[in-house]
Amino acid sequence: MILNYKAIIKISGILIVILACLMLPSLLVSHIYGESDASNAFLASVIPMLVVGSIIIFTVKADFRHLKIRDGFAIVALCWTLSSLLGSFPFIISGYIPNFFDAFFETVSGFTTTGSSILTDIELLPKGLLFWRSFTHWIGGMGILVLTIALLPMLGLNGQRIVRAETTGPIFGKLTPKISESSKILYLIYFGMTILEILLLLPGDMSLYDAMINTFGSVGTGGFSNYNSSIAHYDNAYYEVVIAVFMLLAGTNFTLYYFALKSRWKDFFSDSELRLYLLIVTASMLLIALNLRFSGSYDTMGESVRFSFFQSASIITTTGYVTADFDLWPAFSKMVLFILMFIGGCSSSTGGGIKVIRILLLFKLLKRGIGIRLHPRAVISIKVNERPIPSDTLSGVVNFVFLYMGIFFVGTLLLSLENFDLITTASAVAACLGNIGPGFNLVGPVLNYSIFSDWSKFMLSLFMLAGRLELFTIILLFTRQFWNPDK
């Protein structure tokens, strides 16, 4: 047997039930606001999911003790795709997004925390559907399967197979001996961060509903807003600072917060990836602010810093919230943002992109290459946080970056069949693959992805899933070796 099919099916059933339960808050919101169409759509989605999921759970007998690596990859790919399909039901059933490809694109964009949208007028949707749309960010931010493992300790023994296939970044480490306990710790940190941001956003004119929507989008680094103009709707510097700070916090390696809770401050502040992350954010903010000010885009340096700080934080964390139409900014500022799209957040964060740790390792590889050219007999090891990095990890980083850029170029080539301009095409692929959301030109911050055909939307949806699952999880499913029982 190639795969542990019974375990895969049973875990899928468990996930279906959990996903149905996660729709209940959106059903409650629809009921509170008297939205019968949305309420009926959620009921029509939840009830069948509970029935089907329960049947699978109680009829399928599975052994979770012998999950293999390929089982983990299959489970993660299947469950993320299944969640996106089932999560689109409320949009389709309610009739607000009747086209399957549109609904699937919107839901994939939510769960993968991309934030790309096909909606031309977001504010027409009922509050319950908008709540679900943003809540998918929160669910997908930490990981759908990580949530499942945290809630179900029976999967803890071999949960590492699943978590490793879903975790972002080249280096994976457990916080505790049991994966289920590590998952719970991460979710407690995630939940605490969520509550704190909601409380900080409540002072002023922001309602609890809006505070929750904006928090889901920022701690999940997703970027879905309930307003067409995104965070610019509020035109409030305080809200912008709070949201920007939490975007940056969510783009940081969550393992560091565990170190902070354990008062391991040396491990926290000496982390090489965190230092480079903050350096990139600071440098980008200053470069864009100076460019905006001296190009005359804004009247004061204060305004330039305000908008550059928010947008730099939003793009590098792959959130995609906007406070200004950066597509109107000077070419230099847009180029800096475009570079940030590829860099992304830190490993083991809710952000997408290539990840800062890989950028750090690439620079170290380059430095070693130069050193070896100068001193051919030198033995130069590469270390991060005073720990040597194994050669297979370094090889994996190079392979990942090569594959990432390869998919970007192939995707741009395929999307160019739509015959839109190069900037629109390339930025759309970069934004979806990096789970960012807005691109430039026709997919800029004040526009959307409705211009593309159903086939292109489906292709971009696959890019979003591939980007969220670190490419290899999806790519492996299309290789002959994965399905070969002898390997």
Image (spheres, grey):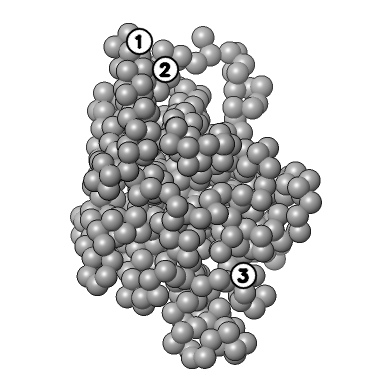
Say whether residue 277 is left or right of residue 45. Answer: right
Q: Residue at x 34, y 63 (%)?
A: 246
> Residue at label 3?
327
Task: Check disc 3 and report its element: helix, strand or loop.
Answer: helix
The residue type indicated by label 1 comes to Val
Q: Nearer the viewer, residue 185 or 364?
A: 185
Residue 193 percent across, percent down from the top left: 27, 56
Q: CA distance from mark 1 to mark 3?
A: 52 Å
- Which of the 4 image quarters holds residue 66? top left
> Which of the two marks, 1 or 3, is nearer to us in this view?
3
Labels 2 & 1 near each other (Cβ < 8 A): yes
Q: Which residue is mark 1?
A: 60
Return the disc, 1 or 3, that comes first in the chain's sequence: 1
Q: Which label belongs to residue 332?
A: none
Mark 2 burial class by Cα count in 10 Å: few <14, some 14-19, many 20+ = many
In the picture shown, does residue 274 fall above or below 402?
below
Q: Which residue is mark 2?
A: 9
Residue at 21% x, 62% y: name it: 199
Which residue is at 24% across, 72% downward? 204
Which comes before the other along the chain, label 2 or label 3?
Answer: 2
Q: In x, y percent, where is residue 354?
A: 55, 53
